[in-house]
Amino acid sequence: MRLEVITDPKAMAEACSVARMSGLTIGFVPTMGYLHEGHLSLLRAARADCDTVVLSIFVNPIQFGPHEDYNRYPRDAERDLNLAKTVGVNLVFMPTVEDMYPQGYSTFVDVQGLTEKFEGAFRPGHFRGVATVVLKLFNIVQPHRAYFGQKDYQQLLVVRRMVQDLNLPIEIVPMPTVRESDGLAMSSRNTYLSAEERRAALAIPRALNACREALERGERIASEVRRAGLAVIESEPMLSLDYLAVAHPETLEEPDVVGSSAVVLIAARCGSTRLIDNILWEEAGGT
Ligand code: AMP
């Protein structure tokens, strides 16, 4: 199968329109590139469900804060295109920053509520940048389905909310977090970690597991569940915690007492690298 790479937004919209007009379903996976198994799992799901698989690779400057890692974010187009071929991607959209945000660009999407806490609080403007670029990409590609990883749990909720609020005719498909064999969630940012930081970062999935174990042995007091995870993080001096929260999986409200399901969200810094992860927990036998 041929893989077509397009950089111009108009040409991309045209190619997607041709596919749609021929009756093909379009599955879309937006990414910032430097692909790993997490991204590939989304692409494989799109390949299995849809006729045409579209991948976008764009390191979106407006979702990075002024002191964040936009400039050093890893980029390797050749490697990404080779990986894209192996999973049967049909179209790759790789726009330039100037094409996405030309001189005079002035329009932004603000999803309220869900964006206020956690990542939104630690990265002001982040979700505004995410929602804006995702809406632009949706308008260009006009996919039937779009695949998002639960690794970025709050982002998934924000995108879902935007799709619902703005009546976009797109099905958002959530996909489970892909992990390294030792439990660390795959992330393009893992390449920043030194060997020592990489080892220390394992306290993140261990903390989440400690929270899960607390829930599974019947603990329902949210502060106690949280305490189980905090103990793990505090035992790792190389980690500096931004937040560890036990929240409702849809509203992200933090209950005092956990109901039949919860998401445990964590963000921590390891050296100069900021990592996020989460687990979704549902009571066994729950609906
Ligand atoms: P990114 O390139 O980091 O912006 O991620 C692009 C898409 O891949 C987003 O929907 C992410 O949630 C998803 N993703 C990133 N890492 C993982 C992972 N470890 N497992 C599953 N999906 C992931």
Image (spheres, rainbow, N blue to C red):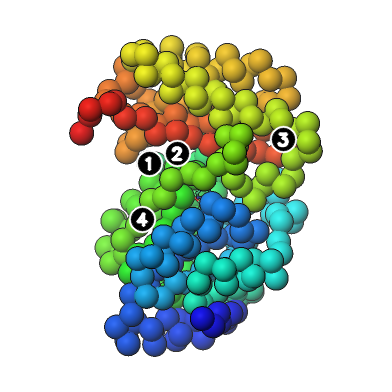
The CA span between labels 3 and 1 is 34 Å
- Residue 79 visible at all: yes
The residue type indicated by label 2 comes to Glu
The CA span between labels 3 and 2 is 30 Å
Where is mark 2, residue-wise? 116
**Crowd rating for badge 4 (residues with CA inside 10 Å; few <14, some 14–19, many 20+):** some
**Closer to viewer: mark 3 or mark 1:** 3
Quarter of the image where the C terminus is located: top left
Labels 3 and 1: the sequence-earlier one: 1
Horizontal and vertical percent position of residue 242: 59, 29
The residue type indicated by label 3 comes to Arg
Labels 3 and 1 touching (C-beta < 8 A): no
Q: Is residue 19 above or below residue 234?
A: below
Q: Which residue is painted at 59% across and 18% down in the image?
A: 232
Horizontal and vertical percent position of residue 16: 42, 81
Task: Determine the secondary structure under disc 3.
Answer: helix
Where is mark 1, residue-wise? 113
